Image: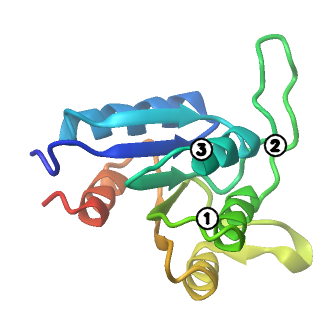
Amino acid sequence: MVCYPQMNVLLIEDDPHKGDRIAKYLQEVLPQVHLKHVRSYQTGMHAIVNGTFDLILLDMSLPVYEVRAGESGFDAPSFAGEDILEEMRRKSIPGNVVVITGFETFGEGETLTTLPELTGRLAKRFPRIFKAVIYYSPAESTWMKELSVVIGCL
């Protein structure tokens, strides 16, 4: 199943297993995909500002900076992906953004947000650049089918 002869995709995902599975799937359905994979808010924003992408696949919870070997890691704000969308809107950066997340809720207490609530909020706030939220489960293949629909691979 080949969707496009060539597509530039930015994957902003910090989980190595999830990132590898998404990358492998993209290479199967888009054999000539040009994939750039970054793992933090900061490197994601740098790539968006300095590149041109047909599709941006965005995790919602990301560390602020790349975690290097031997480091314990950094906090991963629950809504870092939404912050990226906000910066894209603020800077008038066009794009087709799909959020791929393994969480069904975000935040806690008063900021607790369900996946359907998040989807509605992103659609309302970023109608020109936000395309969909896909729930990623490593035990299921539903996310692959949903991603294929979003990128037009049927």
The three-letter amino acid code for the residue at tag 1 is: Glu
Cα distance, mark 1 to mark 2?
21 Å
Residue 25 pos. (x, y %):
30, 38
- Circle count: 3
Tag 2: residue type? Val
Point out residue 121 in the picture as x, y percentages from the top left corner: 64, 83
* Rendered image: mark on residue 104: 1
**Above or below: residue 125 compared with residue 11:** below
The residue closer to the viewer here, 105 or 56, is 56
**How far is the residue under mark 2 from the one under mark 3?**
18 Å
- Whether 131 is drawn above or below 147: the answer is below
For discs 1 and 3, the disc positioned in front in the rendered view = 3
Residue that badge 3 annotates: 50
Q: Is residue 148 left or right of residue 4?
A: right
Residue drawn at x 87%, y 35% is: 74
Crowd class of label 2 (few under 14; some 14 to 19; many from 20; radius 10 Å): some
Q: Identify the residue at the far top of this view.
A: 70
Which numbered marker is on residue 64?
Answer: 2
Left or right, 93 with respect to 128, comes to: right
- The quadrant of the picture occupied by the C terminus is bottom left
The Cα–Cα distance between marks 1 and 3, rounded to whole angstroms, is: 31 Å
Of callouts 1 and 2, the N-terminal one: 2
- Closer-to-camera residue (4/145): 4
Q: Amino acid at mark 3?
A: Asn
Question: Camera-side residue: 136 or 31?
Answer: 31
Picture residue at 68% right of the left edge, 48% below the top:
45
Sequence-earlier tag: 2 or 3: 3
